[in-house]
Every structure is written in C-alpha cells, then in structure tokens.
Amino acid sequence: MILNTELEYKGDLFPSSIIEYKKDVDVLHFTTANNVKLQLTVLRDSVLRFRYSTVGKFNKDFSYAIDKNASRGYNHLEISDDEEKYIVTTAKLICHIYKVDLRISILDAIDKTIICQDELGFHWEESYELGGDIVKMSKVAQNGESYYGLGDKPEHINLKGRRFENWATDSYAYGKNTDPIYKAIPFYTGLHNGKSYGIFFDNSFRTYFDFCQERRNVTSFWAAGGEMNYYFFYGPKMEDVVVSYTDLTGTPELPPLWALGYHQCKWSYYPESKVKEITKKFRDLKIPCDAIYLDIDYMEGFRCFTWSKEYFPEPKRMVKELADDGFKTVVIIDPGIKIDMEYDVFREGLEKDYFCKRADGPYMKGKVWPGECYFPDFTRPKVREWWAGLFKELIEDIGVKGVWNDMNEPAVMDVPGKSFPPDVRHDYDGNPCSHQKAHNIYGMQMARATYHGLKRFNYPKRPFVITRSAYSGTQRYTSTWMGDNVATWEHLQIANIQAQRLALSGFSFAGSDIGGFAEQPNGELYARWIQLGVFHPFCRTHSSGDHGDQEPWAFDDEITDIVRKFIEIRYELLPYLYTTFYQYYHDNVPMLKSLVLFDQEDTQTHYRTDEFICGNQILVCPINEPNSKGRRMYIPRGEWYNYWTKEVITGGKETWVDADLDTMPLFVKAGAIIPKFPVQQYVGEKEITQLTLDVYYKDGKEDSELYEDANDGYDYTKGRYSLKKFNFAGNGDKMIIRIHKRGLFNTSYDTFKINIHGLPFKVKSIKVDNEYVDLKEVKFKNNSLVVTKLFTNLQLKAD
Ligand code: GLC
C-alpha cells in the first residue's frame, strides 16, 4: 500500500494562513487562503474536536463511534487573538491556533505548560489511486513521553517507539507484535511531565499511528481516506482522559450478573449428549459455571439460525434442561449467509436485497465455514432491523441467552487480504461508501444488530452479546474476546496486556480464550491462565478442540482443585466485580487499571506490564513462567495486604512474592471493604441471606462502594438499585465505617458478616449507629461480627 510512511511528505500539501474566522456558539470556523477549513468544537472544558477539510466544505457529519448521550457543556469559553494566533480558553485548556499555518498548541489552563503541540500539524496527500486524501497529523513528542491505548494490540503496554495499523483482521494464532489484529480502536493517551491527554482519531478508514518510531521526537497518525477528525481530551489524570473518551463513545448497559460468572466453550461441543456430559461434570465436581457455548457445529451445515437435526434434534428442550441446571446457552452466529435457495434466511436476504454488492453490481461472494456466502450489509438500518428480527425463534422460543458474533472483520477465506475487496459498497447509514471506509465498522454494526435482536426478544431480561471485531463505541452493545490466541506462556502475558489495553481504550468487558485457542496447554499453564482470567471482566475457557480437552478437569486432580479454587474466588467476588461494572457503566471508569493508570505520578509504573488493578482495590499479577514458586513484581505506592497471608506491605518498590501453583500474587488495598457472596455453582443458585464484608484495616481513610440490584432486568434504570458508599477510617485504637445508601432496591440479605483484617488493637467496645452493643449480641469473635444490613455507622474501639 502507498501508506508505508508518514514522512513521505515531499508531495504533501499544507494549510496556508488563516483568512477568515467565525464563531458559531461553541464551534469555531477557520478558513485558510488555500481553502482549508478547520472546525474546532468545544465539547467540554477538557474536550475539543478538530475537523479539517481540504476542499472548503465538509461532508455530512456522521460517526458510528459517538454515543448520543455523550456529555457536553463547559464552564468557561473565551476567545481572543493576537498578531500570531487565536487563543481559545476554557476552564481546563488553552488552545492556540496559529494564523500563519493553522498549527495547534494546547496548554494547561492553570500552569500554562504545553500538553500537546503540532509538529507539521495537519497536512495531506492527494491520492489519485484512493480517490481522496491521505489525511495526516503530526505532533511533537514531549520529553519522556509515553503512549498507551489502541485497543487489542498484542504489544508492550507502552506503545512508544512503535508503529501500528488499524484494520480489522482475522488473525488465527497471532503472536506478540502481530499487527493489525481483530479490532480498530484509534484512541491513545500520552503521558509526560506527570500530565496525560488523549487523542481519538474518529476515522474508520485504515488508520496508522506512529509513536516516535520514524522520528524520535514526533508522533503522527494518518488515514487512507476520510477526514482528519480527532478529539482531544485532557486529564491531567490519565484515568480522567479514559473516562472522557469512554463518555464520548459510550458504555454498555449492565450485563445480567450471570455473564460475570464463568463460561465454558470449545469448538465444538456436540451432540447434545456431549453438552450434557460437560455441564453435568461441572455440577458433579462442584466447579461453578454459568454459561455453555455452542460453536458452529450446532447448525445445519453452518447455516446461521438453523440447528443440526442430527446433533440437536430438540433444541428447546435441551436449552430448558440446561437452564434448569443453571446453565445459560450461548450460540455462535457468523455474518456469512450460505448461498442456498432452500435456506430461508438466504432467500429472504436475496429477495429484499440485503446483501453487500461489489461496485458494479454483483453480490459480494466469499467463502467462509458454510462454503460460498453472501454477507448482510449491516451498515443499512433496514438490514440491522431484519437481522435483529431473525433472533425471534432462537431467543424468544428456544430460550438461548447469549449470542457470539465471530468472523465479523469480516473474514473471508482463501483470498488475499482475508476480507472483502475495497470496491464493495455499503450504505453506511445513508452515506454510501466503499469497503475502505466500512471495513473497520462492519463487525460493530453486526454486533449492534445482534444486541437489538436479543434485547427485543429477551426483554425484560438483559441481553448478552460477544463480538470478535470492533471499532470505537462497540462496547455499547457487546462484550469481546481477543480472538484466536495460542496455548503458550507468552500468550498468557499477551492476554494480560490486551485486557488492560482494551480497558484503557474504553472496552472493559473483555477476556481471552483461557488456556489458549490454538494448541494445547499443559495443566500448569492452564491453571496459571485461570488465575489471571478470573480477574478479567469476561471469563471464558475456549479452545479449538483440535488438540484434546480443555475443561477444568482435563489435566489432573491437583489442577482441577486449583481451577475450582480460583473460579470459587471469582464467584465470591461477584458483588465486587458487579460494582466495578457499575462504575464502568455509570462513571465510565475502566474495570482494569494498568499501574500507570492507577498511579501515573510514580514513573516506575510507566513501563509495568504484568501488574494491574482489578476494580479499584485488588492488585493482581499473574505468574507468566513455568515451574515458578513466585515472582518479582512491582507493588504500587500505598499499603497492600497480601490476600493469602494478610501480611501488609508498603508499595513503591519491587519485591519477591511467593506463589506456588495453588496461589498467585494477589493484594488488597489497605482500607478497602470488599463485598463477598458465598460460593454458588451458578448465579442465583442460592438466595443470599448474609453478605460478607472483608475489611482491610488501615491507619487512615479509604472509600469503597457496593452496587446491587436484581442482577437482571431493567428495574435498576427506574431507581431500583442500591448503592452503598463505605467510608473507612482507622486511627490506631479506633475504627469507623460509615455507610451512605442510595436507591430503592431492597437486598435479599438482612445481615452483614464483617471480617476485619489487620486490626491493630483489641476490641473493648462496639457501637452500632452510635449505641453501644454487647460484643455477644454481634457475635464478635476473632475480629469478625454480624451486623444488620441497615446500619449506617459502626465503631470499634480499644477502650
Ligand atoms: C474462529 C473463532 C473461534 C471459533 C472458530 C469456529 O476461529 O475465533 O473462536 O471457535 O472460529 O467458529
């Protein structure tokens, strides 16, 4: 392709000097002498949008990425100019637009330091071959700057010194540094001098990012078509940058709680007796599990929305029997529709003209699992509506609870590029275009249509969708996984980085194929991978099935026990994970935090890859090597309890942590209050009559949250939820927990079992809601006690 280097700017064109400026409320319009237009929109005090046109006018403003509910509004906006530049000032930022060449500098409004500055700034190349501009942007890389984000790249967490391409690609058995893979998420954060900002290049064409690889002091991004259209977010905290990007591109609704349980998958479980054998084994061995997956072999000749009569003669009965045993059935649905006049989905799609076509009219024909297929144009609203409707039988009648969208890059077999050719036409919601523009959003629109189908036919229960391909904003509709990884130790580390990177890129509900998809893990690798996987928002074992079994019992009894132990920990932590999801859904906060996101001021964190925080208070670090008795890891600043020994360690340093095969390095932040359920074999198996709160004492203060609701359905959107904020305070001989509660939901339990770890004094008196209580009354023993759920204030004292 022509786009090998951003630097080939010899023939590039640049804006000349500004000759016109107009302000239209919060949109500023600048025009240059050579007819370049810049539209600068002030979305928020810390969010600006830059849009450039090289032809004096803009095309219709349309994006699949932006959430219609994104926040807007600022506290302050002032525009002035001097000889050199226009100056836009908000409460957080100052933006300079240089009159001579339209270049931009963005400064912190308070201390006036430079945050982000154009190098060449916007420039472009007219591409005869593409039929449009290659739009380019280059920025000065600041001293010591680091870069993070970009979705699913299987690369070092810090992107500095590397170049990337965004083009959704089916990548069986990808490896470290394979680029691109399945997703296109053109968002990154920069961090320098303790301050962080973000850039979202909302352009669905093939995009490129270069982080100081080509030139040491320059970061650039460009696209093979479309507009130079990017959003700038300022922190200075990186978490706030990610929150702003996530606010702009949206978060999912809350998933049904079972979706946060453990999922078992394989290519493929069939026939029905095999599925039942697997689910029975989970229950017999008492290994919690909530979902069982049917891969492509459940269908009749891989025709979507059909069932193999031979393997699954009575799907409705089977799905019900599985449901009675606590298993939700999730089935795969791919985009390719088999060319077969006997097949009603195909016939209908053909009759109604719903399939993608080549430029000159023929249908886009491509080979996938079923053989030759046509592909719905999911970028047409009517086609999405039709697709959603196809789920009626599967969901409403048969009772399937989740749908897995795969091969939606879209993948095509045996052709160069492994996808559609560039001339294929798409509707793009009334903005007709070629595949060059629609490729990266194709999978997203498929998942969107699927989500609407599930929502319609599963209502009032919540839908569950999982997709392989994605563009920015896809997280509004679906969860995701990292595609076809490999059963190697290196891939365990890659999975860890990808989950962190996706969370930092607004897509928290993600997980890897635990154990690896291609090839076969040994028991040790599988156990270490489960240990990591239970701390990922989405937790599923999946494998290609070619190389033997990959269920928790497929190795030996020791491994089975370890796997059970960690899945049980996940089930105990469900209220914590659900609260973390709530914070993602409601506050746009990423569910996993790389250490740099957790504490950017500590420069030690800028290159840490293995350690991460799950939620706000649990520090996790997987073991990435065989035969380990533990590992060295970095403990971030602050005080942390070893989860197993309850020993307290002060962070800000690297340390050795013991971790035989049946444990892993796991720490809890001092002051945290961690809510726990009893172990259940599946969500809802037991009525929760008592909730455990594990309190990790600290000299000082720490806040925690607990979000609860009916675990499914939409009552929570009408106020029927319960959000408790716990304020913990300890001072050596006294400890207080205050609870502030919001919401109308009444939890099923009536007491809290409170376990206090690390209490430095012997308890002499206890007050609940300012009244002394007898220690016996609250069953006080070994620093544990039982208190009614309605308390708002608990105090333990040494006198
Ligand atoms: C693709 C998917 C994989 C699935 C297989 C068969 O390789 O990534 O998860 O099992 O197709 O459907």
Image (spheres, rainbow, N blue to C red):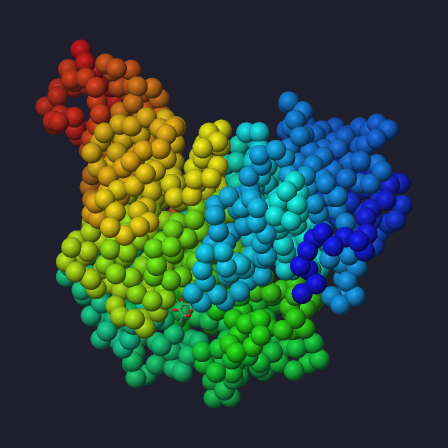
Q: Residue at x 45, y 81 (%)?
A: 370
Quarter where residue 95 is shown: top right
Q: Is residue 177 left or right of residue 81?
A: left
Quarter where residue 272 is shown: bottom left
On the question of residue 474 being in view, the answer is yes
Q: Position of residue 275 (x, y in %)?
A: 25, 71
Q: Nearer the viewer, residue 652 or 457?
A: 652
Q: Residue at x 52, y 39 (%)?
A: 243
Q: Residue at x 50, y 87 (%)?
A: 340
Q: Is residue 484 left or right of residue 662?
A: right
Q: Position of residue 564 (x, y in %)?
A: 20, 53
Q: Residue at x 56, y 57 (%)?
A: 184
Q: Check the picture and name the quadrant holding the C terminus.
A: top left
Q: Is residue 709 above or below residue 124?
A: above
Q: Nearer the viewer, residue 388 or 2?
A: 2
Q: Check the picture and name the quadrant holding the N terminus.
A: bottom right
Instruction: Give ligand 1's quarter of the image.
Output: bottom left
Furthest residue toward top: 799
Q: Is residue 368 above or below residue 219?
A: below
Q: Nearer the viewer, residue 243 or 661?
A: 661
Q: Is residue 248 left or right of residue 19?
A: left
Q: Position of residue 750 (x, y in %)?
A: 22, 36
On the question of residue 321 being in view, the answer is no
Q: Count the marks.
A: 0
Q: Position of residue 558 (x, y in %)?
A: 15, 55
